[in-house]
Image (spheres, grey):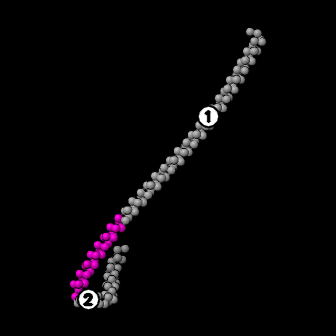
Amino acid sequence: MNDRQLDKKIQQDAAKVKKDLRTLAEDSANRVGNLEENISEATTHAEAGIATWVEDNASKMSRELGKLTRDARKSMVSAATTLKEDIGHGLSQYNTKVREMVDKAPGGLSEQAAKYPWVALSITVLAGFLLGMLIRPARQALR
């Protein structure tokens, strides 16, 4: 091979290397562009997934909180109804026993209390004070 052929061969090889480098640079640029698109798409999907997850969990929590509130309300209404019935029953028993005691009292106490209610109230208040004085020392001894 002579010098001329060698120069021609070198120029062809150099042109081929330049072309290959240009193709390699274009491919690299395309891959970087595709990578950017893939990252952008993945980020968009991740954001949408996270937003959906947050909304789903928030609505689930809201439903659970509503259910808990309704259950608590039902329990409180049930307890209040039971308590009201128990108190009504207890007061009814108390009134019955007091009425029996007043009816058994000598001297027609029930008729006198009906005629003079202020006297009956005064006697009841005095009895309450006496009972309070009797119980009070016992309460202090417990401390």
Please tell me in which quadrant of the rendered image residue 72 appears: bottom left
Which residue appears farthest toward the right when viewing the image? 4
Q: Residues within 10 Å of mark 2 (few under 14, many from 20)?
A: few
Which residue appears farthest toward the top when viewing the image? 1
**Residue 89 seen by the camera:** yes
Read off the magenta span: 78-106
Q: Is residue 75 above or below residue 92?
A: above
Magenta stretch, main secondary structure class? helix
Q: Quadrant of the N terminus?
A: top right
Locate residue 96, reporting x and y percent: 25, 78
Q: Residue at x 27, y 90 (%)?
A: 112
- Residues under labels 1 and 2: Cα distance? 105 Å
Q: Does 80 appear in magenta?
A: yes
What amino acid is at disc 1? Asn
Residue placed under numbered mark 1 in the picture: 34
Residue placed under numbered mark 2 in the picture: 111
Q: Classify residue 47 as left or right of residue 81.
A: right
Q: Residue at x 52, y 44 (%)?
A: 49
What amino acid is at disc 2? Glu
Kind of element beneath mark 2: helix
Q: Classify residue 108 as left or right of residue 20.
A: left
Callouts 1 and 2 close, C-beta under 8 Å: no
Locate residue 37, reporting x and y percent: 61, 37
Please tell me in which quadrant of the rendered image residue 119 appears: bottom left
Q: Is residue 1 above or below residue 68?
A: above
Q: Does 34 appear in magenta?
A: no
Locate residue 120, reporting x and y percent: 31, 87
Q: Quadrant of the C terminus?
A: bottom left
